[in-house]
Image: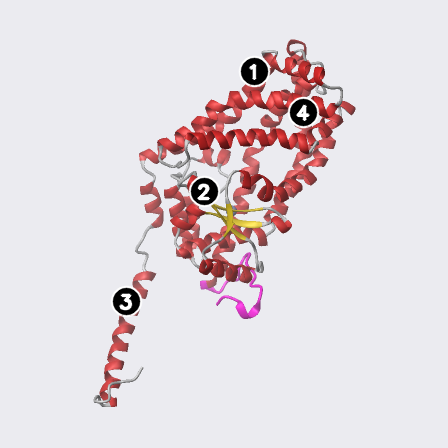
Amino acid sequence: MSRPRNTPPSQDFLRIAGAALVLVLVAATLAHAADAPTRDYLAEARAAFTPENRAYSQTRVFLRLVGPLYGILAGFLLLFSGLSRRFRDIAHGLGHRLYVRVLVYFTLYATAIFAISLPLAWFEEYALEHQYGLSTQSFGGWLGDSLKGHVFSIVAVAVIPLLSLAWGRIVASPKRWWVWIAAGTLPVSLVAIVLQPVVFDPLFNKFTPLRDAALRTEILALGSRAGIPGRNVYEVDMSAKTRKINAYVSGFGASQRIVLWDTALQGLKRDEILFVMGHEMGHYVLGHMWKYLAVVSLGAFAAFWACAQLAGALVRRFGAQWGVEGVSDLAAMPVLFLSLTVVTLATMPAMNALSCQVEHESDVYALELTHDNDAGARSFLQLAKDNRSDPEPPAWVRVLLYDHPPLGERIRFALEYRPWEKGEPNRLYRPKAPNLAVN
Ligand SMILES: [Zn+2]
């Protein structure tokens, strides 16, 4: 820029110097104001957890506990009412091949369970969410999604004959079948993880590559510092269904991706989104999927063994009453599924503890990657507000149901954790390119 010719250079310099001094002073004041803890995020999260939100949160806790019990009761209902026995007779009447019998039985069984569970699902997924202004989905849309999920499970059993393969093992070795099924857990889980984002998820929502080009560039830059360049980042149109916010990683290999709900794009500030991305990247870099798979595929041996013991005991005790001849009788399928639910319920505290550990590691990673404690705490506060979640749940609720640390804990940690300010080394984040290392 050129200066006016009639002003002597020295005066010009003084004016510029004066303005610069004022700017420096203003900037220093602002920086100080930003440094000072002007907002108490934890107090804000507590204040946001109004009696209304507490009622919502408590109802959800109740439903999370009642849901599996309701499923177990539904299984017993099919057995004691004789419906399961009748379904088996129909399946046997329609074909000789195990594949056909299993498919027919499963279709009848799954449809009965779907119908019995529908009122509870309606209350949990539709009525409650509307009562608290969280759902944006119409009743028709919700019912359509539910029906789609149900039909998909039957189509999956028809297309991928895993259930009839598994049933074949039960028929062939009624005592040792659980070993075979446990051994199949790892490969089946891997295939399911690969297929979920490309086959299952698109049935229910629209996924598009992240449209905000500037944000995309920032996320990719963060990714390259984390050592995961060119990762797929998608947005999903969840605002058509809910006001809640979320982000997650899914898939494996070519199907692997980070997914942001569009509600998160609308509800979170830019630096908060980047922090959330840092957390998701932590899951990748720290190999959490592999740790989880290792635990699940090894734990499957204990779980299916326990399931076999429980199902065997139930069939011995009630088989005659149910018209079920043994665990390899198709009519025993509800016993196996409800036994699996019981075992899964029993392992829930341990699995949640593992999940909380892994989620905490990702928080550590995001903080070390971004050094943005404030954005981290703010994003957790926003999550607590938008999802109406309890920042400080009772200990028993935490142990039984929380697969992420409570948001109050995450806020506190996000504000406190700053090893780089004390010259201490990072616990988890290792800068990938030395020239891009953070200060
Ligand atoms: Zn996570």
Residue stretch in magenta: 421-439
Instruction: Determine contact: label 4, label 2, CB under 8 Å.
Output: no
Residue on which disc 3 sits = 29
Q: Residue at x 69, y 19 (%)?
A: 330
The vertical placement of 228 against 107, above or below, is below
CA distance for labels 2 and 1 = 36 Å
The spot of residue 86 in percent (x, y) is: 64, 13
Q: Residue at x 44, y 63 (%)?
A: 421
The spot of residue 26 in percent (x, y) is: 27, 69
The vertical placement of 274 against 139, above or below, is below
Left or right placement of residue 387 versus residue 358 in this view:
left
Q: Which mark is residue 77?
A: 1
Q: Answer with mark 1 or mark 3, whichever residue precedes in sequence.
A: 3
Instruction: Determine contact: label 1, label 3, CB under 8 Å.
Output: no
Specify the farthest residue to the right. Answer: 172
Q: Is residue 406 visible?
A: no
> Camera-side residue: 429 or 134?
134
Residue on which disc 4 sits = 103
Q: Residue at x 49, y 34 (%)?
A: 401
Left or right placement of residue 23 versus residue 242 in this view:
left
Q: Answer with mark 2 or mark 1, whichever residue precedes in sequence.
A: 1
Quick one: label 3, few (<14), some, or many (20+) residues within 10 Å? few
Q: What amino acid is labelled 1 in the image? A: Leu
CA distance for labels 1 and 3 = 70 Å
Q: Is residue 226 visible?
A: yes
Left or right placement of residue 365 versus residue 407 in this view:
right
Helix, strand or loop for the magenta stretch, by majority: loop
The vertical placement of 51 against 216, above or below, is above
Instruction: Determine contact: label 2, label 1, CB under 8 Å.
Output: no
